[in-house]
Image (cartoon, rainbow, N blue to C red):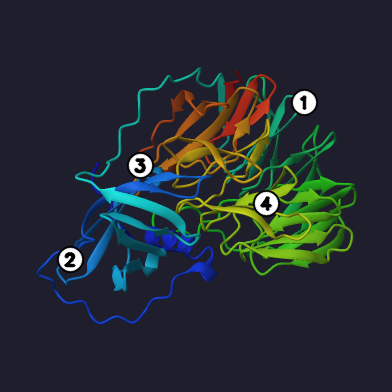
Amino acid sequence: MPTITSSPGRTGLVLAAAAVLSCCALARADAAPPQPATDPDPIEGKWYGMAGFPQDRIELGFEVKRNDQGELKVYLYEPVLNFYGLELPGALERKGDDYVLSSYVTSFRLVDGRIEGTYMPLHDPMSLRRTDSLPSEVPVPDLPRGPGPRWQVKLGGQIWAAAAVRDSVAYVGTTGGVFNAVSVKDGSFVWTFNAGRPMHGEPLATDDAVFFVCDNGFLYKLDRATGKEIWRYDLGDARAPRILPHQIVYDYDFKSPRPLLADGVIYVGSGDGGFHAVDAGTGQRLWRFEAADRIRTDAIVSGAQVVFGSFDHFVYAVDRKTGQQVWKADTYAEVDGSPALIDGKIVLGNHGSLVEALDPATGKPVWRRIWWGSAVESTPVAYGGRIYIGASDLRRITCLEPKDGRVVWRTDVYGWAWARPLVTGKIVYIGTGGSEPYQMRHLPAMTALDRTTGRILWRWPMPVLPGVLYYGFAAPPVLAGSTVVIGGMDGTLYGFPAE
């Protein structure tokens, strides 16, 4: 593989991770302009070892060398994030006995011929030794292809969100403006509804109705049997901007929230920062809460409160009856992963590489983990006393202990695991996305992993589409009896046999 170099877009995302806990950042000291050096600095060379707290340790390496201007430049080798020679921004500065790379919140100290230091804003400890060689990316192994889909149906627009399944029917919207009801048995159409604008959120299906949000600014309630509109509620965000993924723009925004139903009330966020409580029977507003930026992810109920995240970096807990704020918690980056209530804690990820667990009563952190520079759009899933979560450039599914965030296993699935995993008694299912061009390899596939060990059982590669920037799966897989239903960015809804 060719050496990966930095770009303004990718560097911006890495720096967002470094700003997750800005209070922890190292201050940049004034330094004299670098002068060309004739003798090598003791820090120059190749270094490799381990980094992280005991709950999550990774292999990590750096190469340090001078450029033509005499600056000490640092090149990152971090296999867990698929970096093999990434030039980090800024230059390494000498501060007493320490070498500091302020742009990456990283410090080095030479101790008895090795490097001891701290890495990224949580100051994860690292210990490195000199090496003659640093790793390079390995090919994707030859894996079983699995059963393949038993049916597939073209829906005419990209599918970014999970289908809602009830009574052997899958309900799903697309960017093509059509909301579809599809038989899980064979992929045939049951009915369609013309919403007229793109849909990016997972629907909610009840005994008699289907609820979903649309980019025309409305929350819809349809009759589940016929697809006829019962009411629509104006969320007020029809003019809210939406940026889909781009190869150098990382302010992407491909989600909408799934409506949440509790005690006859629908709770849902909107793209203008509003959070709404709507009477499920009549479609009338009960109250509206205002955040400072978009709310694009799902809410959860936690006792008398409803909890949700916003692109304004905060997680909010709001009283379900009054809409009054109970608490808010700063995550230091856009919250584009939905929260989940797991083991008495609110667990979620964000765009700044943070995964954390919050106390539902106060919003205070119980534990925090930096996801090594990767955004975390995936929603965590609890099963069998463990947490399962995907990630973006980390390209891994991770299994965690809910008590303290300790990593049990972490598996490379070779593509963006943006979605919420589907977890069953034996298997973790995930769809992955890919792109070309991009600074690292991401490939589209449907993958099944052993739930206990993380071992890949099979991987069904999705064809790479010529001339298309993004392809594969962004939507979560869902279980419908003996079928796993998942929508693709190619506009196709697939039904795989469940195992």
Please state which amino acid type lies under the numbered disc 1.
Asp
Residue hosting label 3: 441
Residue hosting label 2: 67
Q: Nearer the viewer, mark 1 or mark 2?
A: 2
Is 479 left, or right, of 327 in this rendering?
left
Q: Nearer the viewer, mark 2 or mark 3?
A: 2
> Relative to 245, does residue 292 appear above or below in the rendering?
below
> Relative to 404, does residue 253 appear above or below in the rendering?
below
- Ranked by sequence position, the earlier of labels 3 and 1 is 1
> Rounded to the nearest whole Å, what is the CA distance between mark 1 and mark 2?
64 Å
Dot 1: element: loop
309 or 92, which is in the foreground? 92
- Ranked by sequence position, the earlier of labels 4 and 1 is 1
Which mark is drawn over residue 167? 1
Q: Nearer the viewer, mark 3 or mark 1?
A: 3
Quadrant where the C terminus sits is: top right
Q: Badges 4 and 1: C-beta atoms under 8 Å apart?
A: no
Label 1 crowd bin: few (<14), some (14–19), many (20+), radius 10 Å: few
Please state which amino acid type lies under the numbered disc 2.
Asn
Q: Quadrant of residue 293?
A: bottom right
Q: Nearer the viewer, mark 4 or mark 1?
A: 1
Q: Quadrant of residue 66?
A: bottom left
Label 2 crowd bin: few (<14), some (14–19), many (20+), radius 10 Å: few
